[in-house]
Image (spheres, rainbow, N blue to C red):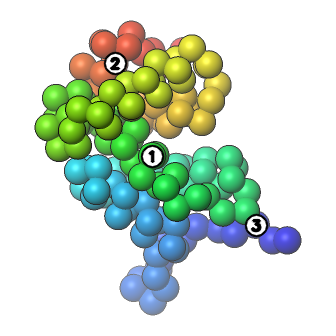
Amino acid sequence: MAKRRSSLGFLGMFGRSGDLRQLDEALRKADLHPALVPEGVKLTIVNLMHDRWPDEPPADSYTSVAQLCGYCVAGLDVFEQANGREPTLAVERRIEAALEAGDSFDAQIVLMTLHAKLINPEVVERYELRAD
C-alpha cells in the first residue's frame, strides 16, 4: 500500500490535505490560531502522527496533539484560561510522562516546539527543557 502524503496545496489549485485541515481545526479548538504555527511544523506533526498510526490517526488524536502543542506555545496561564483546569492538568501530566520516557510521541511534539522556537519560555523554565 502506498503511503499517504500530506499536502499544503499549490497556488490555490489544489487544496490542503485533510490531515492538515483537521490539525488546523484542532489547533483552533485548543485556542491556538493555526497561522501561529509554521506550515513546516504542522507537516512535521502530521508526519509524526502518521508514523505513530500508519493506517489513519484516530479522530481524537488531532485534539490531543493540538492541546499539547497549544500548551507548549501558549504557556500555562493562557492555555488554562482558554481550555480549563482539567485539560491543563492532563497536558501537564503528559509532559511529565514524556520527560520521563525520553523518546515518546509526546516527547517528540514537545521537542519539536522547542527546536522550532515556538515554545513558551515559561514552559522551558518550568520543565527545565533544553535541546542537546
Residue type highlighted by circle 1: Ser
Give the left or right position of residue 122, taking residue 104 as reference.
left
| Residue position marked by numbered label 2 in the rendering | 124
For the residues labelled 1 and 2, the Cα–Cα distance comes to 20 Å
Spot the residue most to the right. 1
- Label 1 Cα neighbours within 10 Å, binned few <14 / some 14-19 / many ≥20: some
Q: Earlier in the sequence, mark 3 or mark 2?
A: 3
- Label 2 Cα neighbours within 10 Å, binned few <14 / some 14-19 / many ≥20: some
- Which quadrant holds residue 79? top left
Residue 92 at x, y percent in the picture: 37, 25
Residue type highlighted by circle 3: Lys
**Nearest to viewer (mark 1 / mark 3):** 1
Residue 28 at x, y percent in the picture: 28, 58
Q: Residue at x 68, y 47 (%)?
A: 52
Q: Are marks 1 and 3 in contact (CB under 8 Å)?
A: no
Query: Which element type, helix, strand or loop, lies under badge 3?
Result: loop
Q: Nearer the viewer, residue 39 or 128?
A: 128
Give the left or right position of residue 52, taking residue 79 as reference.
right
- Which quadrant holds residue 74? top left
Residue 20 at x, y percent in the picture: 47, 65
**Nearest to viewer (mark 1 / mark 2):** 1
Q: Is residue 39 above or below residue 74?
A: below
Query: Which element type, helix, strand or loop, lies under badge 2?
Result: helix
For the residues labelled 1 and 3, the Cα–Cα distance comes to 23 Å
| Residue position marked by numbered label 3 in the rendering | 3
| Residue position marked by numbered label 1 in the rendering | 64
Q: Residue at x 52, y 20 (%)?
A: 97
Q: Is residue 64 above or below residue 103?
A: below
Q: Nearer the viewer, residue 42 or 87?
A: 87
